[in-house]
């Protein structure tokens, strides 16, 4: 299973691709789309949409996992972040890929085992889990963590369903 993790942002959108091969996690790629501040906002959203679409075309992920919106003190920033997330989600759904959503707390819990972990802890754990030669760019690291969170959550839900015959998902699922 290949998962594309996305850390959306109106100026920088990170992405990370992780493949689950048996019990191993394999790093495929990561990076970020820097939309810049010189473009008007609709063109920045198009860059996010086009960037995510091109990554999906290149790697053909089975599923996409996106970080949820956090509570922002600035309403304007929260609106722009929501629109950037929307562009990424629509790119995935438009490409026919199922989308799942996780909170930052869920991501940190799944990767580090502690929901209040610092960014540096998450980055060090990602480096160890994926055998990265160096710590990835901050937004790309967050995206890799979202992908790993989804893989780990999928395993947990699968075990719950297999063991009890019933399960409940703690994520939002957007089907294409």
Image (cartoon, rainbow, N blue to C red):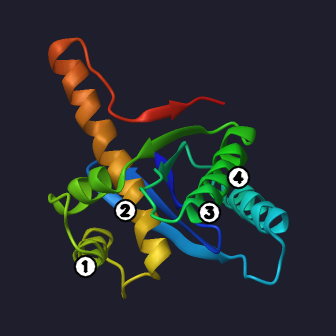
Name the residue beneath numbered marker 1: 124
Q: Can residue 144 be seen at all in this image of the molecule? A: yes
Point out the image quarter for the C terminus.
top right
Residue 154 in the figure: left or right of residue 48? left
Q: Is tag 3's residue or tag 2's residue first in the polypeptide sequence? A: 3
Quarter of the image where one finds residue 126: bottom left
- The residues tagged by marks 1 and 3 sit, at their Cα atoms, a distance apart of 32 Å
Residue 107 in the figure: left or right of residue 140? left
The reply to whether the C-beta atoms of the residues labelled 4 and 2 are less than 8 Å apart is no
Name the residue beneath numbered marker 2: 145
Residue 100 in the figure: left or right of residue 59? left
Name the residue beneath numbered marker 4: 87
Q: Is tag 3's residue or tag 4's residue first in the polypeptide sequence? A: 3
Residue drawn at x 64%, y 68% as measured from the top left: 10
Query: Percent x, y for residue 121?
Result: 22, 76
Residue drawn at x 35%, y 47% as measured from the top left: 151
Residue at disc 2, secondary structure: helix
Neighbourhood count class around disc 4 (C-alpha, 10 Å): few under 14, some 14–19, many 20 upward = many
Q: Is tag 4's residue or tag 2's residue first in the polypeptide sequence? A: 4
């Amino acid at each position: 299973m290949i998962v594309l993790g996305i850390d959306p942002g109106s100026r920088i959108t990170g992405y990370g691709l992780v493949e689950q091969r048996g019990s191993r996690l394999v790093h495929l790629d990561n990076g970020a789309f820097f939309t810049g501040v010189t473009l008007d906002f609709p063109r920045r959203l198009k860059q996010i949409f086009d960037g995510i679409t091109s990554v999906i075309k290149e790697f053909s992920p089975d599923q996409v996992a996106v970080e949820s919106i956090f509570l922002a003190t600035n309403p304007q920033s929260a609106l722009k972040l929501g629109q950037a997330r929307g562009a990424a989600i629509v790119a995935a759904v438009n490409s026919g890929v199922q989308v799942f959503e996780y909170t930052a707390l869920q991501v940190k819990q799944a990767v580090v085992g502690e929901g209040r972990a610092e960014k540096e802890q998450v980055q060090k754990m990602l480096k160890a889990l994926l055998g990265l030669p160096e710590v990835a760019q901050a937004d790309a690291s967050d995206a890799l963590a979202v992908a790993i969170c989804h893989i780990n959550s999928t395993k947990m839900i699968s075990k719950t369903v297999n063991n009890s015959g019933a399960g409940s998902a703690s994520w939002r699922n957007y089907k294409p």
